Image (cartoon, rainbow, N blue to C red):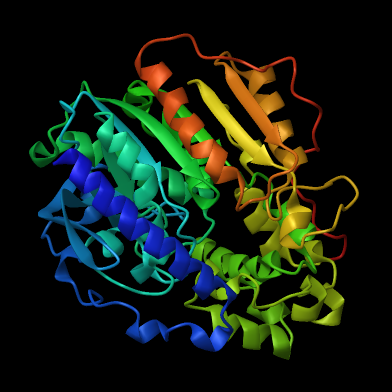
Amino acid sequence: MRTCTSRLLAAAVTAALAATAVAATAGPAAAAPAAARSATAGDPFYAYDGSTPLASLAPGTVLKTRTLPYHVLGLPTPVTAIQLLYRSTDAQGRPSANVTTVVRSLAGDGSKAVSYQSFYDSLDPKDGPSRAVAGDVSISGLIPNVEALFLVPLLAQGYNVVLPDTEGQNADLAAGPEYATNTLDSIRAATRSPATGMGPDTRFGLMGYSGGAVATGWAAALAPSYAPEVNAKLVGYTEGGLLVDPAHNLKYVDGSLVWSGITPLSVIGASRSFGSDLTPYLNDYGRSVYQQLEHGSIVDALGHYPGLTWKALVKPQYADPNSAPPFVEAVNRNNLGSAPTPTVPGSIAQGNGGFLEGTFASPPGIGTGDGVAVAGDVRALARQYCATGTAPVAYQQYDLLSHFGVPVVWAPQAVGWLGDRFAGRPAPSDCGHIPPGNSLTPEQPTPGH
């Protein structure tokens, strides 16, 4: 049964990969309207309707539970998924209700699990992994379907897989601290629900790439303070394609052929997540792009705005991003270099072949990267962890691979690295051998603004 299930998932994922490639190169008109993207938009499971205020419940409290088949491209598979509505905390520190999915391994006993953070990167909550698992089919929601490919080897090796909707129910794109709380409270909920087969002794590894790496990195950093009992269960974290300092990332992709659309996507995400308003700084074209992407995803942004620059989006007096105070506040709150150092072993992979994806810039003090993530920032973060922490840090840079290329080599290595941690083998360390990186000092507002 396990072999048959794995083959079914792999075949469906192959089809999803092809469909995603087509969607990413389609024009903006190819994206489905936000209002029509979800077959489960009115699903009552996502709404907390209890009589006890969320603020009175502990983070990680399970609010609802349901069991359903794991779907790929809307098709049910023999794999069973358990979904939990649980209490968490949003980017502004307010109590929230969020959903996570637990997939139980037929080969495991519940003693070990991997929290896999998706790179679904969307401003539409209907694109979350839980919707795809429940059978929703949308262009932007193809990404969680593709990621089933990463889950197959984990399930086959006896790991339960926990798949949180890291952005929460408001789709707070790129809000690192909220990604962390949603991830950590998801683990709390998974170990408190009898339906998952896990408990307080279940050990966890964290795994994520790109947007999933943002969630993984922030969760590892905030676990000791926000969820110390979860931190005690962690064997380590493995991540790739990590965005560390958003201000650097936006300058790096400025004017790129593929990744420039991430700028307005991030602007909208920052406004939503932290309750700030960047629209007064936008010009007419910027507001038009804002409206186009307000409920869009990375599929709607990649390659749809070739050559787009920050200056093209804002009024002339805000040509310097640091002249917009909400921008400075948002990027600083999302700067992983200002977060605490994880206390568990880590493995970080980063590409540096961004020219393959049409990002040719090398801004002073920033340099090159994989097309969207800055290699110098990731090196700096790894070196910072080595200098300020005691846990081993492994670092691998792939100079000839881009953001889309690294997962092919990263994913199997990540699974192997986690396997060694669960087996109790000493974690490797590259501390002392990681080349210098960039300054991760927080941004300063332009004088007079």
**Image height of 429 relative to 285, above or below:** above
**429 vs 110: above or below:** above
- In what quadrant of the picture does the N terminus appear? top left
Q: Residue at x 39, y 67 (%)?
A: 141
| In-front residue for pair 351/412 | 412
- In the rendered view, would you say 225 is above or below 60? above
Name the spot of residue 339 as percent of width and height, x first. Answer: 59, 36
| Left or right placement of residue 45 versus residue 273 in this view | left
Q: Does 272 appear above or below 392?
A: below
Q: How many marks?
A: 0
- x%, y% of residue 180? 44, 43
In the image, 357 versus 43, the foreground residue is 357
Q: Quadrant of residue 231?
A: top left
Q: Quadrant of the C terminus?
A: bottom right
Q: Residue at x 73, y 75 (%)?
A: 306
Query: Residue 79: x percent and y percent?
Result: 17, 49
Identify the residue at image location x=27%, y=70%: 136
Task: Residue 290: give x, y in percent of width and height.
Answer: 60, 81
In the image, 161: left or right of 228? left
Q: Quadrant of residue 244?
A: top right
Q: Image point 42% across, 74% down: which residue?
A: 139
Side (left or right) of 65 relative to 191: left
Res 43 quadrant in image: bottom left
